[in-house]
Image (spheres, rainbow, N blue to C red):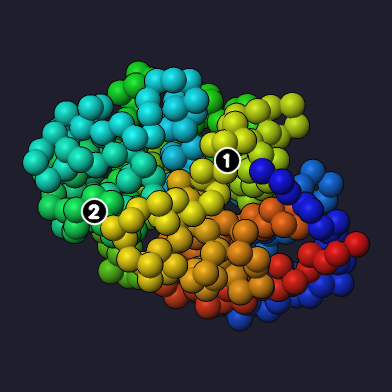
Amino acid sequence: MATNSISTTLDTKRWQAALQWVHRAVESGQFPAVSLCAGVADRIERRHAEGRFDAMNPADPATVAPETPFLVASLTKPITVMAVLMLVERGLVRINDRIADFVPGMNRPDKNSIRIRHLMSHTSGLPDMLPENERLRADHASLAKFVEEICKCDLLFEPGTGVSYQSMGTALLAELVHQVSGRQIGDFLKTEIFEPLGMNATDLGVQGEDARKVARIRISKEKAATNWHWNSPYWLGLGAPWGGLTSTASDLGRLARLFLGGGVLGRTRLLSNQSVALMTSSQVQSYTRISEEDQKINSWGLGWRIFGLGVGSNLGELLPAEAFGHHGATGTLMWMDPLRGAYAVILTTQPYDLSGPMLMKLSNAISAAFVAE
């Protein structure tokens, strides 16, 4: 993947203006806390964090720092996809294999045509969440129980004929990693991705003291009364492969640099150029039974969302068509711009359904800070 074809730098005044915007948003309470990392390839990196550690307890004086882990929600998904592609590169699975060959419960008339590539590109027909989602969480269900229920659920459409965001497809990818590697997804990610990249503050599933270090998300009183909400020991410990990752902005910045480097960070190569290309360019267009309109609106690579023609509002409005990234329900967003060799990671504790427009404004301000030298 060619990156940084334009010589780019981070304009100091524009970056400071973005930080002032963050300060005002935190002071006004629009964002309880924010952590940022932005940079240009391996040459420039800027970090910033401010705000309350516990969005649910205004009396708590603790504040976040750049080293504070955040629950990053769906930024987890492309990392789970990355794990599967590492198995593909080792010759252990094929992208076009049936998931039923690895998860026998999926060998059902309506599901036995689902391919691994469908799960990676949100074209499997599986739902985002199961109808029994809240009950399962209230029961503190294991990941294995979620997989069992996924095998029983109804599809929204025939695989490969539509695009619908599906967290449950990512859950099956994690089970695939488990079946093929013999390791649980959290352990695989730690030893095969996080440790080699020096992402030492990143985990899929944290407990005890490690869980207490994670910044608390602002949630409703109704959700706070449950025993399965985002800040609960259950959810932080479950390690949901579709949304349970805890990380720092700077750790995710290292991941961004890996993708901008074509699968290499420093002297560490984790993915081939070919795998990076599959993850960061639209794969939905290869499905002839998906409408042209759907292909434009839902432009997915394998794991990453592509800026493309119709999804700019999900990443930022000042990015080129080559940009890719993801956002998360806890109020997180990251993007990579291979044209400029630039990246940005924005972590907050204000849920995305309340903060989406504000995140876009901040994304725009950061994108505008990257200028030609």
* Residue nearest the observer in this picture, 312 or 69: 312
Pinpoint residue 51: horizontal percent, then vertical percent. 63, 65
Task: Name the amino acid, label 2.
Answer: Gly
Q: Which residue carries the number 1 mark?
A: 276
Q: Residues within 10 Å of mark 1 (few under 14, many from 20)?
A: many
Q: Residues within 10 Å of mark 2 (few under 14, many from 20)?
A: many
Question: Residue 58: in sight, yes or no?
Answer: no
Residue found 20% across the figure and 40% down from its top:
113
77 left or right, relative to 367: left
Q: Name the quarter where the C terminus is drawn.
A: bottom right
| Mark 1, secondary structure of its residue | helix
Pinpoint residue 285: horizontal percent, then vertical percent. 42, 56
* Residue nearest the observer in this picture, 344 or 238: 344
| Mark 2, secondary structure of its residue | loop
Task: Name the amino acid, label 1.
Answer: Val
Pinpoint residue 213: horizontal percent, then vertical percent. 54, 45
Given the current orientation, which residue lies at the most extreme left position?
A: 109
Total marks in image: 2
Q: Which picture quadrant has residue 111?
A: top left
Residue found 23% across the figure and 27% down from its top:
101
Residue found 57% across the figure and 40% down from its top:
276
Check if mark 1's residue and mark 2's residue have beta carbons within 8 Å.
Answer: no
Pinpoint residue 76: horizontal percent, then vertical percent. 46, 46
N-terminal-most mark, 1 or 2: 2
Residue found 78% across the figure and 68% down from its top:
369
Q: Establish if 122 lies above or below 356.
A: above
Question: CA separation, marks 1 and 2?
Answer: 24 Å
298 left or right, relative to 123: right
Q: Which residue carries the number 2 mark?
A: 125
Q: Which picture quadrant has residue 353?
A: bottom left
